[in-house]
Amino acid sequence: MPSTAFQARYLDVLASIYLYNEYRGYTALDRVIEAVRLRCPDDPQFTAEVIRHRADERKHYVMFKRWFELQGRMPLRLDTRFGHIDRFIQWVFGCSIDQLDTGNVVADPAEFERLCRVIMLGSGPINRATRLCAGPDPAAQPPRSCRPGADADLPDRSHG
Ligand SMILES: [Fe+2]
């Protein structure tokens, strides 16, 4: 059984990594939405699904941010070395997220399918982290500090 200090540190590291990844996810999806709107104007349902996914990512980001804010602490400062989506994009497309030309990727059906697979891979592990944040009983409601969307308008202190 790990010590309380070890558990607290583990949760700090885990929550910081998720916070970073959710941030990278929803901001990258902003660019994907822009490209999808340009390239797929006749498919509003698909655009709406991407927008919903972006909203989920943002909700997860706010959830982890709030977890730190309610404790009056800052998350660990992380960079792309801790980003799942950063690594997946690098492996699949051979460039960073910032270098990825989302317009060209969306225009090419095969490339766009690869991007969708990367996005799906990057958003998978959230449920495990949410359960850890909620406590040992997986059937229990997350504590108030972990509820998504509890306060979406708090200032962003984590990615300066
Ligand atoms: Fe997420």
Image (cartoon, rainbow, N blue to C red):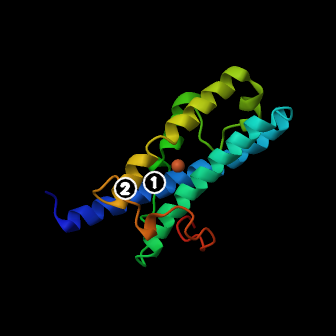
Above or below, 55 against 115 in this view is below
User: Is any atom of residue 89 visible in this view?
Assistant: no
Q: Secondary structure at mark 1?
A: helix
Cβ of mark 1 under 8 Å from ligand 1: the answer is: yes
Residue 81 rendering spot, x and y as whole percentages:
45, 47
Residue 100, picture quadrant: top right
Q: Which residue is at the far top? A: 110
Question: Which corner quadrant holds the N terminus?
Answer: bottom left
Q: Residue, x 56% and y 33% (percent of image)? A: 118
Q: Residue, x 44% and y 69% (percent of image)? A: 145
Task: Give how far apart the Cα atoms at labels 2 and 1 are.
Answer: 6 Å
Residue type marked 2: Leu
Residue 11, picture quadrant: bottom left
Q: Secondary structure at mark 2?
A: helix
Question: Which corner quadrant holds the C terminus?
Answer: bottom right
Q: Residue, x 60% and y 36% (percent of image)? A: 95
Above or below, 16 against 157 in this view is above
Instruction: Find out whether the residues at labels 2 and 1 contact each other: C-beta distance under 8 Å.
Output: yes
Residue 10 rendering spot, x and y as whole percentages:
29, 59
Using the image, tell me which numbered label, if any, was put on residue 18: 1
Give the left or right position of residue 26, taking residue 79 as reference.
Answer: right
Give the left or right position of residue 18, taking residue 53 as reference.
Answer: left
Give the left or right position of residue 30, taking residue 81 as reference.
Answer: right
Above or below, 87 against 142 in this view is above
Residue 141 rendering spot, x and y as whole percentages:
40, 60
The residue lying toward the viewer, choosing from 99 and 114, is 114
Residue 49 rendering spot, x and y as whole percentages:
69, 40
Q: Which residue is mark 2?
A: 14
User: Is any atom of residue 145 visible in this view?
Assistant: yes
